[in-house]
Structure formats: C-alpha cells, structure tokens
Image (cartoon, grey):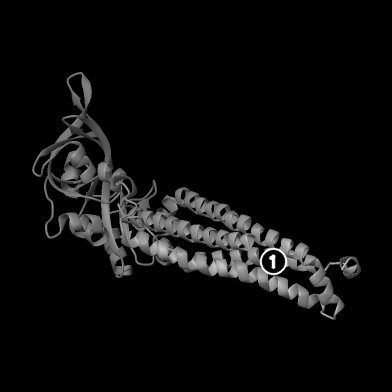
Amino acid sequence: MLSMLLAFFGVCIGLCVLLVAMAIMNGFDKDFKQRFFVMNYPLTIMPKFYSNIDDHLIWYLRQEFPNLHFSPYISTQVIAKGDNGFEGGLLFGVHFEEEKKINEVVKEALKDRNLSDFDILIGQGLKEEFRLNFNDKLPIIFSNLNPSGLALIPQTKRFDVKASFRSGLLLYDKAYMYADIKALRKVLNYPEIYDGVHVFSKDAMADLPKIKAFLGESFSVFGWWEQNANLFSALELEKRALFIVLMLIILVASLNIVSSLLMIVMNRRSEIALLLALGASKAEVKKSFFTLGTLIGGGGMIAGVILAFLTMWVLGNFDIIELPADVYGSSKLPLDLSLSDFLLTLVGASLIVAFSSYYPAKKATQVDVLDALRNE
C-alpha cells in the first residue's frame, strides 16, 4: 500500500513540476521574443553594394504594398559622453511620424509630439546612467573624423534630450538612440539616400517573399527571426533538454509502480495460480494488474495536472516570486503553457505509465501454477 502511494505521489509531483517548468520556459521565451521583436522590426530592407535606397523606391514600395508600413532610416555607431564616462551605442536617423507607426516603444515615448533639429530620444537606461534630465545636453561622438591642425579628431555634436523610452531590455535602453533624419544627415554630411528600411507587417513570413520578388536581387530582405536565428535555436534546444530531463522524473516515479506491482505479484503468487487453475485466462490476469497500474499512474497524472494548474494560478496572481525587471524585462514571473506542450507531456507520461504497468502484468501471467500450489 505504501509503495503504491509513493508511486501515486511520485507521478503527481513529477507531472506537476514538468508542466510548471514548461509554462515558465514558454513564458520567458514568448516574453523575450516580444521584446526582441519590438526593437528588431518584423522585416528589414537593405541595399547591396551596387544599389541605393531613396525616396522613389520608398514611394514604389508604398504603392505596391499599401497594407505595410515603411520607415526608412540611416544609422551610425556613436559614443555618448556623460559626466561619469562614456557609453557606446547606435544612433538612428528616422522620420518620427513613420517610425511611430512601426515601433510601439517610440510611439509610447513620443506620444503626440515629434522631435526636430538636434533633439534626441534616448533609452531610460542611458538616461539613468548619465543622470540626465529632459532638455539637458548630451554630447555624441561620431566615428567620422574632422581635420584639425595637424591631426584628425572625431566629430562631436551636442543633442538636446527631449524624451526617453523603456523597451524592457537594458541592452536596448542603453544602446539605441533616435534623432531626426535631417539633423543626422547634416552632421554626417550624408546624401539623400537611406541605409535601410524597417517594415512593419502583421504576417512577416508571408510578406517576406513578396517583397523579395518585387525588389529583385538588388536588395536584401530579411526577417527579425533570421537575424537572431542562433539565439532562438539555443532557446528551443534548452526547452527540449528541460522537457527530457523532467520527463525522467516521471520515469523514476513510475519505477515505484513497477516495484509495487511486482511485490503484489510475488506476495499473491498462490492466489494468481489458483485463479489460473480455476479457469481464469492469462489475458484476464494481465488485464487486472495492468488496470491497477494504470489506475495508480492515471490517478497521479490527474492529480498532477490539477496541482500544476493550481500552482500556475497562484504564481500568476500573487507576487510570490519577484524578478529583477532590468534583467528579465518584467518583475512578474511569465507563464504560458501551450496546448502542444500540454498534450505532449500527457502523451509522454501516459506511455511511461503504460509501460510501467505492462511489465508486472506480464510477469503475473508467467506464474507456474503447479509450483505455486504445491505447498498450499
């Protein structure tokens, strides 16, 4: 009886841990992809070495794909100078009216206003690190050089800090900056062309080949998932490895089912032999032990599912676990159990329970009737 209870609770706790762990992994994965998606844009168009992106191409793209939003940009690597040090970053020159249509973070930061001249939008991480206030001057050091006497010195321009954004990831909050494209062109002495075009699409995977076909071989078009393919592959591999490791917990718990049923078979050899002698078929004996094993394992699975959903409800509604928001992007533990993971977990656990019940049931049919009843 004790061994069967241990088997029941082992399957229950193992399945609960597996479901909660998969929900947490999915939650972090989904939350991370959403934050990555916001600052990486669904699609990006970039010219190849023998082509240029200009206003005429943007006009043709908007005529051909009226359901998409296009935000052309220029960019340059810069160094922001504060009172306490320096911070490297990437400065984008954009049309803010177009950028707000495709970037929710920029839209939320600017709301009903636009930046002009030498105003700059910076991340909250950089603002806090340099202890800046709105309307403060932020010196930006550019990579292009200006001649001065007998030496070349980097070009420096002071921008007015007018707004700040918070993406949820400190990497972007400290590195990304946005300025008006006309002002950045003046500083860089840049021609009337663009470095690339950010594209917003609700179905980026379907629109990617259409844009590629329209632009031809002169331009490269890629999606945000292609830019970070290695990272997302690593996350998926980690999720699969976690699933396999935690499934082993259920496998270990199911060994209690095997041991408890084998103990019953050993202790009840005479009763089994008597049933077989009285005409019970081996299939009926096997079925009875198999049913007992599945009842133990199946009951543990049902209890484990209930316990898992109860645990996820508690974790989702109460701040039992608080995360550092600057590291994980949110202070709340993300939970998202997909239907496919739930069904895969149930199928895997059911197979383990079935195999654990089958072996003792088979051993019960192999009892030697004469040998078992000889001393009775």
Residue 194, relative to residue 187: is it above or below? below
Residue 171: image quadrant is top left
Residue placed furthest toward the bottom = 279
Quadrant in which the C terminus appears? bottom right
Q: Position of residue 83 (x, y in %)?
A: 16, 30
**Which residue is identified by label 1?**
357
Of the pair 346 and 158, the residue shown nearer to us = 346
Relative to the observer, which residue lies in front, 77 or 58? 77
Residue 338 picture location, percent across and down: 46, 65
Residue found at x 68% / y 61%? 260
Check the picture and name the quadrant holding the N terminus: bottom right
Residue 174 drawn at (x, y percent):
26, 41
Front position in the image: 138 or 63: 138
Placement of 202 over or under 237, stated as above or below? below
Number of marks drawn: 1
Disc 1 packing (10 Å; few <14; some 14–19; many ≥20): many
For residue 181, say whether it is visible.
yes
168 to 362, vertically: above or below: above
Relative image position of residue 54 (x, y in whole percent)? 27, 54
Relative placement, left or right, of 301 versus 140 is right
Name the residue nearer the viewer: 45 or 113: 113
